[in-house]
Image (cartoon, rainbow, N blue to C red):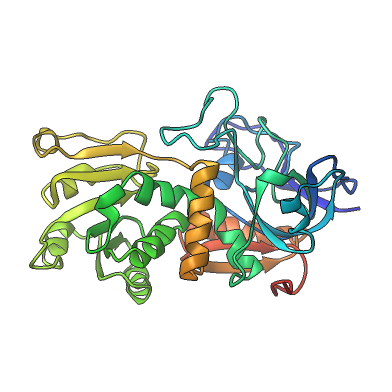
Amino acid sequence: MPYMLTVKQTEGKPGQVYYPLQLNQVPLPTPGPRQLLIKLTAAALNHRDLFIRQHLYPGISFTHPLLADGYGVVTQLGPDPSPAARALLDKPVLLLPTRGWESDPDGPENLAKEFAIIGASAATDVGTAQEWIVLGEDDVMPAPAHLTPAEGAALPLVGVTGWRALVSKGGAHSGKGRNVLITGIGGGVALQVLQFAVARGCNVYVTSGDRGKIERAVALGAKGGVSYKEKGWEKELAGMLPKDRPFLDMVVDGAGGDVVGKTVKLLKPGGVISCYGMTVGPKMDWLMQATLKQIELKGSTMGSKAEFKEMVDFVREHKIRPVVSRVVKGLDNLEGIDGLFEDMKAGRQFGKLVIQIGGEGESPKL
């Protein structure tokens, strides 16, 4: 019988508990009308999975499989398949990591009742930490042919989150020749934003507490970077900006904290801070100086199905390869998977942490 990975509920307070992984055997699912049976070959971790194990995430399910990112191959069609579904048979696909958000640029159409991120969620039984999955025809997209299974699994959630933060929220501020600062380089979203911004022709700068990560970001196309551990890093960054455009057009931030105070003098009047997370803390300071400069602070999380399609099409067009930090083999390799979580807890990763579920890691022949 196929395997499925969940978290096991144990006693403990949020933030103090750490739910162990539990391997379960489940029946092979059968696709219904307008559904697909998919053999998952790779799945990837996100920070939300670590938060789930620490009970720092709402609506946790202990019976639904973990993980929101997945890559697999369509092996069987349900009754009455559409022409588009017929074209997917025996082809690799990426799984849509959210539910209940079709195309509204402002946010999910029914945030309170329908929106959900897949993976250990009480709102949906879908998760990618399993060997086989049945999904609706509209819940997948053809995988770009240049991606390996690990790269494909690394893309969905961070890709759509980064695309919305940079492109949907940034607009012209993230266009060709614009100066964009990305904080906390090394995480999946930040790296995906870096790759998107470079492909769009931006001048990209980064921050990190690790000089080695800054060097790796420069190798990926960043113009430079500074360590946020050093006092006055914003002055160092100011010296890196082009003389003909000595200001930032946009900041893409996942930390919160003092980002407004650190960047307000660098941002142009009307510049944008796009915040997709607040890992430093749940609050940030807003300064009168930012108000006087007409700075826009925009909250941004995940993305719609329409934005997911835009993002995947962009990846396909520009042959972008998501950065993979480390891969472990086998859904039953609990020790190895726990090691990926330890990498995430310690902040060691540069890119995505991936589980190879099946096969030898090669893309299926198209």
Asked whether, in this view, residue 215 is left or right of residue 332, the answer is left
Q: Is residue 250 left or right of residue 288?
A: right
Q: Position of residue 154 (x, y in %)?
A: 57, 60
Residue 166 in view here: yes
Along the line of sight, which residue is nearer the eye, 116 or 208? 116
The location of residue 200, given as percent across then percent down, is 34, 63
Looking at the image, residue 215 sits to the left or right of residue 114; the answer is: left
Q: Which residue is pictured at 52% across the width and 37% down the height?
A: 15
In the image, 272 versus 189, the foreground residue is: 272
Q: Classify 40 as above or below 32.
A: below
Q: Nearer the viewer, residue 1 or 57?
A: 1
Residue 108 coordinates in the image, percent (x, y): 50, 31
Which sits in the foreground, 24 or 164? 164
**Can residue 39 be seen in this snapshot?**
no
Q: Relative to 277, say whether 331 is above or below.
A: below
Quadrant placement of the C terminus: bottom right
Specify the farthest residue to the top. 113
Q: Quadrant of residue 261?
A: top left
- Residue 137, position in %: x, y? 72, 46
The residue sitting at 71% across, 41% down in the picture is 126
Total labels drawn: 0
